[in-house]
Image (tube, grey):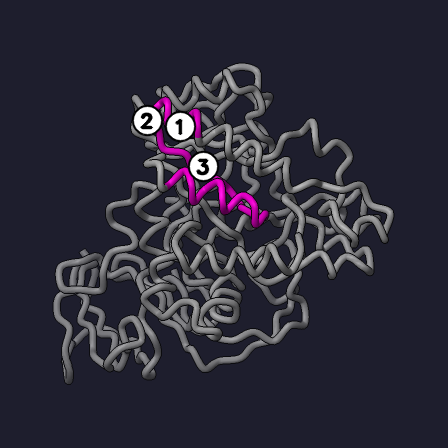
């Protein structure tokens, strides 16, 4: 049971200004001139959205705490408006057993800033050779609903077929990092003119597209739910569109950096721009935005990938791929999708909250702002402008590609089931 919370002068989904009274973690009343003896959160006329859900983050715990841990990653998430995150399994040890996924879930609950849902590995040790115990992880106290070998592709079609068959029986999701490693050996950048000019080995877009096409066929056969991680190629969109039209149960995500950034940024060999899949062309970026607006790409997921300085501040070829994303995601979505009119506020809620909660199987996240629903919100100042500084972000790492950029919109408060977890740039729980 939580004390009443009154949120005043807010605009749900950018609409009319109202007050929202929260009682026992749920919306008790919505109207004008509401009163309460409990705490008050002044809304300032800002936009109220359902709390965001990120299907793809790297919290690095256990084993990589020099780059991030559940506490720092949860803080970054709450400050970015997120109320639930899915933590990828490429930890040390790998999250391929009930013991490890339960540890991650327990740590998330202890920190308490966001709901942390561990993603289980598809194969033992992410080695692609033997299926992990999907059923055991799904039945564990962590209740794993999504499995992935993210960072590596499940390349073997027989292993992937078996995984999808198990997923169908368990009613869970297989999330694929679509990359045919036979085509990307030594790859350092998108295969195109920028890579050729810089002398970097190219990562062809076909390495993504061919795996997505194969997996859609396997998912159709198994009747399973397939989720495609970090789509980056315009040609992949055509594959997804055809598969969805044919009734395949496939969903897909795009990262904020693939909505905004291109391989033109590689000219200075700054490793902060190194990511997998790589930044691609302006045509690909434009296609990502259009597909997200259309719904062919379902959600925005950050692929938040913090790296300690020793792993990132080095020569290009030795640097690890990955970028921070939790605290900048909303601003990038507003800049690339809302400002040009590709999405309205309802659309922002769809791609950052409602649809990811649906894909991840979270019945109490991504819910409408309505009486009787969980009071789980992100309060957004749409008129704010802020300059990104990696050192000022909550993550333990500072590898943001947006360093020095001025971005629109900022989360001013986050509420998780009636409890304020972040406010005015600070975590409060």
- 414 sits to left or right of 176: left
Q: Residue 223: which numbered mark, if any?
A: 2
In the image, is residue 229 part of the stretch drawn in magenta?
yes
Secondary structure state at the residue bearing disc 1: helix
Say what secondary structure mark 3 lies in.
helix
Q: Residue 345 sits in which quadrant?
A: bottom left
Q: Is residue 147 above or below residue 82?
A: above
User: Looking at the image, is 163 positioned above or below residue 407?
Assistant: above
Residue at the spot 40% in from the left edge and 24% down from the top edge: 164
**Which residue in the protein does label 1 denote?**
219
User: Above or below — where is 21 with respect to 54?
Assistant: below
| Magenta segment | 217-244
Q: Residue 104 has which mark?
A: 3
Q: Quadrant of the N terminus?
A: bottom left
Check contact, mark 3 vs mark 2: CB within 8 A: no
- Residue 332 visible? The answer is yes
The picture places residue 185, in percent across and down from the top left corner, at 75, 31
Secondary structure mainly formed by the magenta segment: helix
Residue 191 is left or right of residue 276, and the answer is right
């Amino acid at each position: 049971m939580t004390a009443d919370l009154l949120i005043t002068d807010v605009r749900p989904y950018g609409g009319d200004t109202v007050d929202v009274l929260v009682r026992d973690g749920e919306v008790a009343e919505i109207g004008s001139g509401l009163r309460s003896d409990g705490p008050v959160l002044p809304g300032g006329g800002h936009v109220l959205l359902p709390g965001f859900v990120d299907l793809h983050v790297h919290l690095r715990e256990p084993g990589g705490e020099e780059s991030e841990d559940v506490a720092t990653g949860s803080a970054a998430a709450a400050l970015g408006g997120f109320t639930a995150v899915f933590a990828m399994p490429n930890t040390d040890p790998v999250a391929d057993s009930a013991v490890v996924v339960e540890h991650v879930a327990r740590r998330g609950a202890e920190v308490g800033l966001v709901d942390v849902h561990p993603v289980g590995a598809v194969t033992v040790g992410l080695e692609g050779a033997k299926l992990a115990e999907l059923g055991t992880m799904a039945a564990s106290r962590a209740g794993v609903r999504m499995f992935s070998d993210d960072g590596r592709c499940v390349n073997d079609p027989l292993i992937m077929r078996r995984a999808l068959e198990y997923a169908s029986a368990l009613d869970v999701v297989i999330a694929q990092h679509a990359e045919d490693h036979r085509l990307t050996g030594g790859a350092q950048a998108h295969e195109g003119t920028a890579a050729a000019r810089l002398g970097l080995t190219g990562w062809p877009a076909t390495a993504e597209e061919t795996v997505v096409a194969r997996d859609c066929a396997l998912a159709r056969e198994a009747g399973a739910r397939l989720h495609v991680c970090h789509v980056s190629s315009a040609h992949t969109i055509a594959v997804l569109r055809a598969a969805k039209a044919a009734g395949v149960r496939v969903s897909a995500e795009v990262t904020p950096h693939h909505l905004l950034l291109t391989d033109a940024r590689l000219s200075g060999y700054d490793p902060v721009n190194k990511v997998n899949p790589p930044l691609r062309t302006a045509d690909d970026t434009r296609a990502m935005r259009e597909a997200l607006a259309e719904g062919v790409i379902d959600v925005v997921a950050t692929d938040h990938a913090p790296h300690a300085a020793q792993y990132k501040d080095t020569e290009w070829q030795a640097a690890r791929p990955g970028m921070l994303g939790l605290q900048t995601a909303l601003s990038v979505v507003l800049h690339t999708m809302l400002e040009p009119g590709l999405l309205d506020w309802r659309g922002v809620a769809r791609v950052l909250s409602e649809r990811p909660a649906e894909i991840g199987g979270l019945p109490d996240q991504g819910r409408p702002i309505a009486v009787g629903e969980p009071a789980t919100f992100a309060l957004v100042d749409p008129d704010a402008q802020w300059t990104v500084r990696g050192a000022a972000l909550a993550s333990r790492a500072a590898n943001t590609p947006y360093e020095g950029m001025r971005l629109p919109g900022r989360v001013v408060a986050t509420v998780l089931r009636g409890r304020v977890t972040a406010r005015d740039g600070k975590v409060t729980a």
